[in-house]
Image (spheres, rainbow, N blue to C red):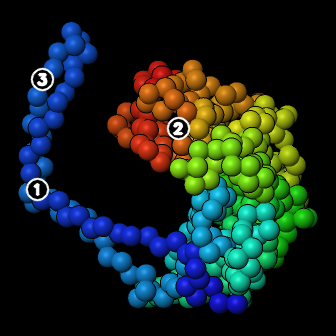
Amino acid sequence: MNSESNYPGSIADQHNRVTPSPRRKTLPVLTLFGITLTTATVLIAADVPWPKFTDITEAAGIKFKHCIGDLEMSNIAEATGPGCCIFDYDNDGFMDIYFVNGRWHPDISDNRGRVLKGKLRNALYHNNGDGTIADVTEKAGVGGYDDSYGMAASCADYDNDGYLDLYVGNYGKCILYHNNGNGTFTDVTEKSGLASPGWALAAPWFDYNGDGWIDVFVVHYLNYDKGAFQRTGAYYEADNFPGPLAYPGLPDHLYRNNGDGTFTDMTKETGLWEPTGRGMGAIACDIDGDGNIDIFVTNDAMANNCWINDGKGHFTDKAIEMGVAFGEGGQGVSHMGPFIADVDRNGLLDILVPDMGYSTLSLQGSSGNSW
């Protein structure tokens, strides 16, 4: 099977290049003390170069094209994803790329799409260090299953052997590939207990209990009904197919690393059980600066979760109290993969959440719990 073919249903990105010119901007500034408006002039220096990017995909040798596993997009499962993972799997100092792909899947795809059955796979590209990248999927053994409809991927050295392992989130069962350190991987999903069936869209790794073994938080999306509700026609047909609110959510799962190659589901024991969530992304970081790793989860068309780690093995959702549960207008929007950074350089982490309509930037105040 060749993943490089241009199958019907593949998703192609269009890149619009804009080169801004140096200029003066007049920005309105709101002064809260007395609620007065003033005007500030910001000079963008003429000698500051703007970053420029060149598309080198073809020259580098990347021929992978994502496919939804069908001839046309017809449901929410096909409209979700995909993702990729950039990591140095062979420790040569150069970053490699793992792409996830769709599949023809009986739960998702139309019968006309059967022509794609068995013809799609995920792909691992090795960075040769000279500006070229080679497809090493077959050698590495990470093409995925025939029915693993790929959504996302993440990496971590879960067994502390010095090599990054690969975790693939799917519609269906997830896959854990152990890095053998020789350019190949072994599927250890069943042995590890990380199949996490459902519909996984993200899987950040972090050591939540400080035992020296990295754990994983698997974000699940919807309980898709194989198109049963869509076939009733009881939805707004101008949207082409039902949206996320037409389906019940799925709980996310926290898996503790036992240090012997196996994992235990600790979701309920740690207070993270939320059966109605519609998770689309998550990031693990010390949001409140207390030395414990917290979890921020973005949900689709509902409130986000901000799980604060108490350092004793328990999490509490404080998204509403911290002001990061909803969008700017107080509504649950299509929040997707979050980013964390100290945007205003006040020493506190801020949160940027992309959205289908508009993004949300939440700046953390000096109290550490106000945004």
Locate residue 320: give its quadrant.
top right
Q: Which mark is residue 254?
A: none
Residue bearing mark 3 = 38
Between disc 3 and disc 2, the foreground one is 2
Q: Secondary structure at mark 2?
A: loop
| Foreground residue among 300 and 152 | 300
Residue bearing mark 2 = 333
Residue bearing mark 1 = 22
Instruction: Kindly identify the amino acid type of the residue bearing the numbered disc 1.
Output: Pro
Residue 77 percent across, percent down from the top left: 67, 58
Instruction: Kindly identify the amino acid type of the residue bearing the numbered disc 2.
Output: Val
Q: Earlier in the sequence, mark 3 or mark 2?
A: 3
The quarter of the image holding the N terminus is bottom right
Q: Distance between the Cα atoms at labels 1 and 3?
A: 23 Å
Q: Secondary structure at mark 3?
A: strand
Q: Residue at x 71, y 52 (%)?
A: 230
Q: Are marks 2 and 1 in contact (CB under 8 Å)?
A: no
Direction from residue 194 to residue 57 in the image, left or right: left
Q: Are marks 3 and 2 in contact (CB under 8 Å)?
A: no
| Foreground residue among 65 and 219 | 65
Q: Earlier in the sequence, mark 2 or mark 1?
A: 1
Q: Badge 1: how crowded within 10 Å, few (<14), some, or many (20+)? A: some
Q: Distance between the Cα atoms at labels 3 and 2?
A: 32 Å
Locate residue 170: give its quadrant.
bottom right
Residue 219 percent across, percent down from the top left: 70, 48
